Image (cartoon, rainbow, N blue to C red):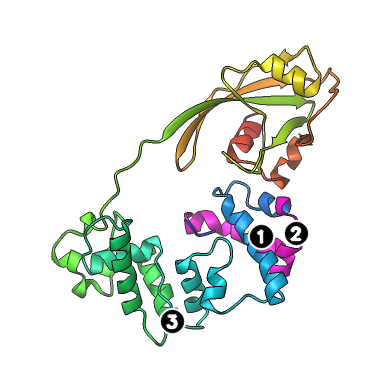
């Protein structure tokens, strides 16, 4: 959960998730849809799918016991070298270097590493520094400490050098160039797209469809999503058999931002309480508003429900 997401955002999700799936086998024995529902709103949903896949592998290949060898951990879906190293170091199994964003910032400033740290050569250089700095003893304490140093003291902007325990040996501080390290990547301009969300309501239930495994919100339940040039009436008749629809006052459009894209969403509110639905595709269902929080949906869906 902490991959690409801040601690303060993760805590309530983690508490809820771990109470539902306290053991690896609890996770492995659950349906992916149930796992996704407990991840709903946290974003980067491939993490949840990988977590579930990893639990299935651990149950099948390791008897439900998490492996304790680096290569075995690294082979699990969704786990890279830094996460594998953190698991081993923080559990005091063996000293392994890690490289999360906080650690990268601390090391690059302390040793004054200039250049684009996403480039292979630079990344290799800073990994070697991380390995060199990881001690042979008390490595669990060190690993937690360097992450916390980056998270609470060596901050991207409001850094607190007066509280830093290694400020005397920090080269960026000596050069008075802390704000220049690590080198900031040029921000890519986000792609912008626009969709109409069909908010089809039948009394206290809403029509949702499960999106396929590709594209935006893969595998999540969403309001039917149409391109802006698609005919609403044609879609509804084709997918529900209803030929006459009753438009309600629409909610204002809003922008839903993802890491790589800004989506303008135009909610189109349609009341079909007096109409009979003749057919629905297998991936569509009506769900009562109060139960929407129990399934895997995006924040955009919940935002619309809250506005209604």
Q: Residues within 10 Å of mark 3 (few under 14, many from 20)?
A: many
* Residue under label 1: 52
Q: Please, is residue 161 above or below residue 116 in the view?
A: below
Q: Position of residue 249 (x, y in %)?
A: 64, 16
* Residue under label 3: 95
Q: Please, what secondary structure does the residue beneath circle 3 have?
A: loop
Estimate the spatial distance between the alpha carbons at disc 1 and disc 3, rounded to whole Å: 27 Å
Residue 268: name its quadrant.
top right
Residue drawn at the location 71% of the way across and 61% of the way down? 20
Estimate the spatial distance between the alpha carbons at disc 2 and disc 1, rounded to whole Å: 8 Å
Q: Please, is residue 284 above or below residue 28 in the view?
A: above
Region of the chain picked out in magenta, as a range: 4-33
* Residue under label 2: 30
Q: Looking at the image, is mark 2 or mark 1 earlier in the sequence?
A: 2
Residue drawn at the location 79% of the way across and 23% of the way down? 240
Q: Is residue 201 magenta?
A: no
Is any atom of residue 24 visible in this view? yes
Which label is found at residue 232? none
Q: Looking at the image, is mark 1 or mark 3 earlier in the sequence?
A: 1
Q: Looking at the image, is mark 2 or mark 3 earlier in the sequence?
A: 2
Residue drawn at the location 70% of the way across and 20% of the way down? 235
Q: Position of residue 303 (x, y in %)?
A: 60, 35
Q: Residues within 10 Å of mark 1 (few under 14, many from 20)?
A: many
Q: Please, what secondary structure does the residue beneath circle 2 have?
A: loop
């Amino acid at each position: 959960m902490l991959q690409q997401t801040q601690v303060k955002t993760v805590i309530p999700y983690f508490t809820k998730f771990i109470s539902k799936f306290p053991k690896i086998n609890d996770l492995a024995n659950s349906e992916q849809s149930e796992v996704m529902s407990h991840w709903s709103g946290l974003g980067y949903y491939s993490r949840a799918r990988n977590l579930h896949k990893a639990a299935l592998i651990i149950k099948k290949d390791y008897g439900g016991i998490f492996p304790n060898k680096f290569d075995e951990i690294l082979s699990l879906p969704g786990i890279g070298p830094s996460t594998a190293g953190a698991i081993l170091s923080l559990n005091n199994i063996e000293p392994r270097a890690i490289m999360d964003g906080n650690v990268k910032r601390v090391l690059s400033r302390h040793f004054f590493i200039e250049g684009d740290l996403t480039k292979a050569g630079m990344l290799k250089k800073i990994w070697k520094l991380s390995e060199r700095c990881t001690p042979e003893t008390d490595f669990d304490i060190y690993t937690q400490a360097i992450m916390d140093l980056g998270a609470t003291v060596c901050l991207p902007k409001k850094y607190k050098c007066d509280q830093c325990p290694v400020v005397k040996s920090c080269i960026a501080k000596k050069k008075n160039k802390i704000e220049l390290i690590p080198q900031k990547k040029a921000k890519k301009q986000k792609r912008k797209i626009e969709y109409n969300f069909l908010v089809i309501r039948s009394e206290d239930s809403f029509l949702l469809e499960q999106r396929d495994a590709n594209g935006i919100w893969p595998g999540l339940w969403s309001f039917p999503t149409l391109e802006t040039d698609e005919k609403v009436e044609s879609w509804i008749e084709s997918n529900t058999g209803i030929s006459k629809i009753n438009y309600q006052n629409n909610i204002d459009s809003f922008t839903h931002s993802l890491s790589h894209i800004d989506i303008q969403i135009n909610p189109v509110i349609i009341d079909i309480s007096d109409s009979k639905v003749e057919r629905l595709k297998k991936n569509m269902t009506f769900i009562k508003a109060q139960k929407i929080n129990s399934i895997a949906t995006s924040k955009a869906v919940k935002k619309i429900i809250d506005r209604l």
